[in-house]
Image: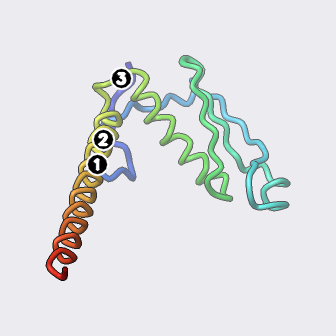
Amino acid sequence: RLPLFQAAGKKNSSNLLALNEAELKEQFVKGDGPGGQAVNKTSNCVVLKHIPTGIVIKCHQTRSVEQNRKIAREILQEKLDLFYKGENSDVFKERKAAEKKKQEKKRRAKENLERKRHFKEMQQLDEN
């Protein structure tokens, strides 16, 4: 196994597996999507493949090749963490917690809406 290290730039610095550069195949291709000529003529989209697992990441979030390389590696680390650790992965746990928080927020909003609807109905009954 690869040594664990603190992932830089993360809100909750979770322990992710270190990337071994020898196991990576990196390509620079032309991006796609909005942006016209600026996107179509420059090869600043990074395609990163982890050879042992076959996981491929395509990153074209910025116009900078260096930033795209960095972002692609961060995404690949998270994907590898999920691949090797499954449900024990910190990434999986963070996503699960975020989903639970989102559902709770939705539930509260629905309750609030119901309360407001009920209050309006009561006001209309009082007026009549």
In the image: residue 59, left or right of residue 19: right
Q: Which residue is mark 2?
A: 94
| On screen, residue 123 above or below 104 | below
Q: Which residue is mark 3?
A: 86
- Quadrant in which residue 120 is drawn: bottom left
Residue in the image at 39% along x and 53% along y: 9
Residue 19: x %, y % from top left: 48, 31
The nearer-to-camera label among 2 and 1 is: 2
Task: Tell me the kind of residue under disc 3.
Answer: Gly
In the image: residue 43, left or right of residue 63: right
Task: Tell me the kind of residue under disc 2.
Answer: Glu
Crowding at dot 3, Cα within 10 Å, few <14 / some 14-19 / many 20+, comes out as some
Residue in the image at 79% along x and 46% along y: 30
Lower sequence index among marks 3 and 2: 3
Residue 97: x %, y % from top left: 26, 42
Q: Which residue is mark 1?
A: 12
Q: Work out which residue is located at the far bottom of the displayed protein and give it.
A: 127
Task: Tell me the kind of residue under disc 1.
Answer: Asn
Q: CA distance from mark 3 to mark 1?
A: 19 Å
Q: Work out which residue is located at the far front of the displayed protein and give it.
A: 128
Residue 79: x %, y % from top left: 47, 31
Q: Looking at this view, is 113 or 61 the one in front?
A: 113
| Mark 3: secondary structure | helix
Lower sequence index among marks 3 and 1: 1
Crowding at dot 2, Cα within 10 Å, few <14 / some 14-19 / many 20+, comes out as few
